[in-house]
Image (tube, rainbow, N blue to C red):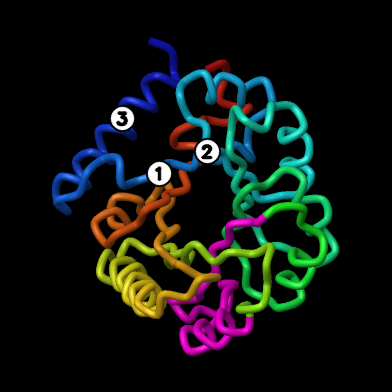
Amino acid sequence: MNELDKRKREIEERIQAACDRAGRERSSVQVIAVTKSISTERTEEVVRAGYVQLGENRPEGLMEKGSHFPEQSVEWHFIGNVQSRRVKDILPHAQVIHSLQTMSVAKQIENRAERVIDCFVQVNTSEEDSKSGLAIDEVKPFIEQLQSFERLRVVGLMTMAPFTEDEAIIRQTFRTLATLQREIEALQLQHAPCHFLSMGMSNDFEIAIEEGATHIRIGTALVGSESGGSL
């Protein structure tokens, strides 16, 4: 068993245990394998291991790897901060954007996309100054402003928890997002079905699953890094 297989087995066991605690089916949680720290060649090994939803946080990384894989073989998620001027570079490769938070980016997507782009609206549920994302009370008005957009669909909300060992703080951050997601979903907006929750990374994905995450973003803990030797 190689190093990737070992990591995959460990991560999958932890996901299953968290699902069991929450009374959820394993199939309700999508793993986004974050490949930002590894090469295209190493990414090929991740895909062969069965992970076809891949995440990049820089346009350069997305452009390089996105051009390498046939579009039907993987689904690329852009998980980093989106700058308006880089939307044109992201769109040809990303099927999903996890960090929509400005109207300028939304307009760029609407004007440049050749297909409907699924987006998560990023929310700063921890209210940290260092975190990106809309304030909680800004989310509904922002989504309502997108009603006329035809090439952008709000499929869910995304957040990042504080980097802390205090589980109660992490859990409350995720719980707040889940509450907001249910409120928006209940509005039954055609342009914003908002069924999904993108939350949880290597250090807190189990808590996120327990609080309702549908998409978890796992990087080095799963895929390793270039400095970590061969997979």
Q: Magenta stretch? A: 116-145
Identify the residue under disc 2: 53
| Residue 197 image point, x, y percent | 41, 61
Q: Helix, strand or loop at disc 3?
A: helix
Q: Position of residue 80 (x, y in %)?
A: 64, 56
Who comes first in sequence, dot 3 or dot 1? 3
Judged from the image, the secondary structure of the residue bearing numbered disc 2 is strand
Q: Is residue 96 left or right of residue 92?
A: left
Kindly tell me whether residue 26 is visible in this rendering.
Answer: yes
> Which corner quadrant of the image does residue 108 belong to?
bottom right
Label 3 or label 2, whichever lies nearer to me, is 2
Give the x, y percent position of residue 222. Answer: 45, 33
Q: Amino acid at mark 3?
A: Glu
The answer to whether marks 2 and 1 mark residues whose Cβ atoms lie closer than 8 Å is: yes
The crowding category of the residue bearing disc 2, from other C-alpha atoms within 10 Å (few below 14, some 14 to 19, many at least 20), is: many
Q: Which corner quadrant of the image does residue 168 belong to?
A: bottom left
Under circle 1, the secondary element is strand
Gap in Å between the C-alphas at discs 3 and 2?
A: 19 Å
Tag 2: amino acid: Gln
| Amino acid type indicated by mark 1 | Gln
> Which residue has dot 1 on it?
30
Q: Is residue 153 above or below residue 224?
A: below
Q: Are marks 3 and 2 in contact (CB under 8 Å)?
A: no
- Cα distance in 3D space between marks 2 and 1: 8 Å
In reply to whether residue 101 is colored magenta, the answer given is: no
Residue 159 visible? The answer is: no
- Determine the CA span between mark 3 and mark 1: 16 Å
Residue 125: in magenta span: yes
Label 1 neighbourhood size at 10 Å, few (<14), some (14-19), many (20+)?
A: some
The front one of 34 and 93 is 93
Q: Quadrant of the N terminus?
A: top left
Residue 10 bears which disc, if any? 3
